[in-house]
Image (spheres, rainbow, N blue to C red):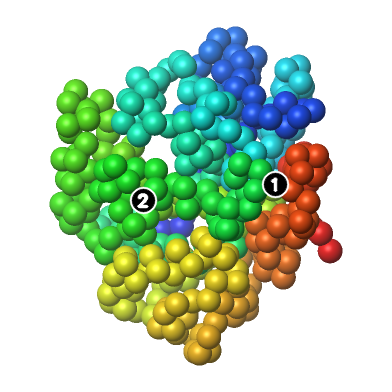
């Protein structure tokens, strides 16, 4: 295990992904390479803009913004991200383009509009495309928010991984933002995660059931997760181009090379302010869990991934209205109602979260709990009119929320 100077929750790394679209039609526009060329003078995969870095992703219509290294304070992070959104939009204006938030483009045709990143690291992307065919929603049409949390040693990894596993199943209840694909409601509030979890059905060991297995040491992680991944991919990657850390596609992945766990199941929201409110709530709940606020570490470690996955599958379908299928899970958090929804559970947790969350983020998060996740708000705003014109109108409002760093509200 790599020696890491940071202990639990001393720092955080945040990553936000945005799609690039043309300003009039809002169709995806593959110009991320030209965006990076504008600021660096050459086509490159990365650009450091002070506290925020920009980088490419698998497809050329997505740009990732991330904290340029771990940050100790999250209070001002949404302003830093928003400043960079404004700067990028100014540059993209020259291409008649702009950034569009949300976890997936609502009408993109990935089979006709996918353009893989054609430059640095293209060998990896091409290999993935040969194995899985990346021209699909779960590959070329998804934008997420990632949280990177540090652990110092083996004991801290055990505590952090146990807590993260417990929180993952109810994250879509507050973060789902992708009810639409192909210009229609998919039946899932978190269509991004529903498609993502089937991305690699060809090699099931890569993603498992999204919720990580109950492994709490590097040795067990190597044996139960990494070794099957490497073994199962070898026939497709005889030259070993892929790295095991890159291949692991669970909803939270352990980076022993960095001393961090990366959480990957959060849909991108309508603005950095909304993103950071969700991030703050997730981190705060994980922190309280590691401290034994709800139940002991031993109690956390006993939860099998299949039981947690049942809850996760319910929340990606119905977000906050999903009924928790296992009453023992609600009871873990101290909620003993016989029938409780994921939204009710978050509402129940609000008073506890208030004591640990940043006050400004808590205020925004409380509004999200009250109004529902972005997916529910989008469904309400769309109503029964799924015309292309109405889609463009609603998502132009979403783009305005990103430009102004505000919430998408319908009431």
Residue 112 figure quarter: top right
Q: Which residue is mark 1?
A: 271
Position of 41 with respect to 197 (left or right) is: right
Quarter of the image with the C terminus is bottom right
Q: Which residue is mark 2?
A: 250
Residue situated in front as seen by the camera: 174 or 391: 391
User: Which percent across, then down, holds residue 298?
Assistant: 28, 76
Q: CA distance from mark 1 to mark 2?
A: 25 Å
User: Which percent across, then down, holds residue 153?
Assistant: 28, 55
Residue situated in front as seen by the camera: 322 or 41: 322
Position of 373 with respect to 210 (left or right) is: right
Residue 344 figure quarter: bottom right
Disc 2 crowd, CA 10 A, few/some/many (<14, 14-19, 20+): many
Residue at x 33% of width, y 26% of height: 130
Residue at x 45% of width, y 63% of height: 313
Asked whether the viewer can see residue 199, the reply is: yes
User: Which percent across, then down, holds residue 374?
Assistant: 67, 56
Residue at x 57% of width, y 65% of height: 318
Give the farthest residue toward the right. Answer: 411
Mark 2 secondary-structure assignment? loop
Asked whether the viewer can see residue 262, the reply is: no
Position of 282 with respect to 75 (left or right) is: left
Instruction: Name above or below for residue 121 compared with residue 135.
Output: above
Give the farthest residue toward the top. Answer: 41
């Amino acid at each position: 295990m790599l020696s890491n100077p940071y202990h639990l929750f001393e720092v955080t790394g945040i990553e936000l992904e945005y799609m690039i679209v043309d300003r009039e039609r809002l169709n995806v526009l593959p110009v991320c390479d030209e965006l990076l060329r504008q600021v660096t003078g050459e086509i490159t995969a990365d650009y450091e803009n002070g506290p925020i870095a920009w980088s490419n992703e698998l497809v050329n219509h997505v740009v990732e913004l991330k904290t340029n290294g771990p940050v100790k304070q999250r209070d001002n992070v949404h302003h830093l991200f928003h400043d960079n959104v404004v700067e990028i939009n100014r540059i993209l204006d020259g291409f008649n383009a702009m950034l569009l938030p949300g976890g997936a483009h609502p009408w993109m045709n990935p089979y006709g509009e996918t353009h893989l990143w054609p430059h640095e690291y293209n060998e990896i992307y091409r290999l993935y495309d040969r194995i899985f065919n990346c021209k699909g929603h779960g590959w070329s049409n998804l934008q997420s928010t990632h949280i990177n949390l540090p652990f110092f040693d083996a004991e801290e990894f055990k505590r952090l991984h146990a807590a993260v596993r417990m929180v993952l199943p109810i994250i879509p209840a507050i973060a789902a933002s992708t009810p639409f694909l192909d210009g229609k409601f998919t039946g899932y509030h978190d269509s991004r995660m529903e498609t993502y979890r089937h991305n690699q059905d060809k090699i099931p060991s890569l993603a498992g059931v999204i919720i990580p297995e109950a492994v709490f040491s590097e040795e067990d992680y190597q044996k139960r997760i990494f070794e099957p991944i490497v073994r199962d991919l070898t026939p497709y990657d005889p030259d070993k181009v892929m790295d095991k850390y890159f291949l692991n596609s669970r909803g939270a992945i352990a980076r022993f090379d960095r001393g961090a766990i990366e959480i990957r199941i959060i849909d991108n929201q309508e603005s950095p302010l909304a993103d950071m409110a969700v991030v703050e709530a997730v981190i705060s709940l994980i922190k309280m869990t590691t401290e034994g606020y709800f139940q002991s570490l031993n109690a956390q470690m006993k939860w099998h991934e299949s039981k947690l996955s049942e809850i996760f599958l319910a929340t990606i379908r119905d977000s906050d209205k999903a009924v928790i299928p296992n009453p023992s899970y609600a009871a873990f958090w101290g909620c003993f109602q016989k029938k409780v929804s994921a939204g009710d559970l978050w509402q129940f947790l609000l008073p506890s979260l208030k004591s640990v969350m940043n006050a400004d983020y808590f205020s925004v998060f409380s509004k999200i709990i009250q109004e529902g996740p972005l997916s529910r708000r989008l469904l309400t705003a769309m109503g029964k009119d799924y015309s292309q014109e109405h889609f463009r109108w609603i998502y132009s409002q979403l783009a305005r929320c990103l430009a102004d760093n505000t919430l998408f509200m319908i009431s």
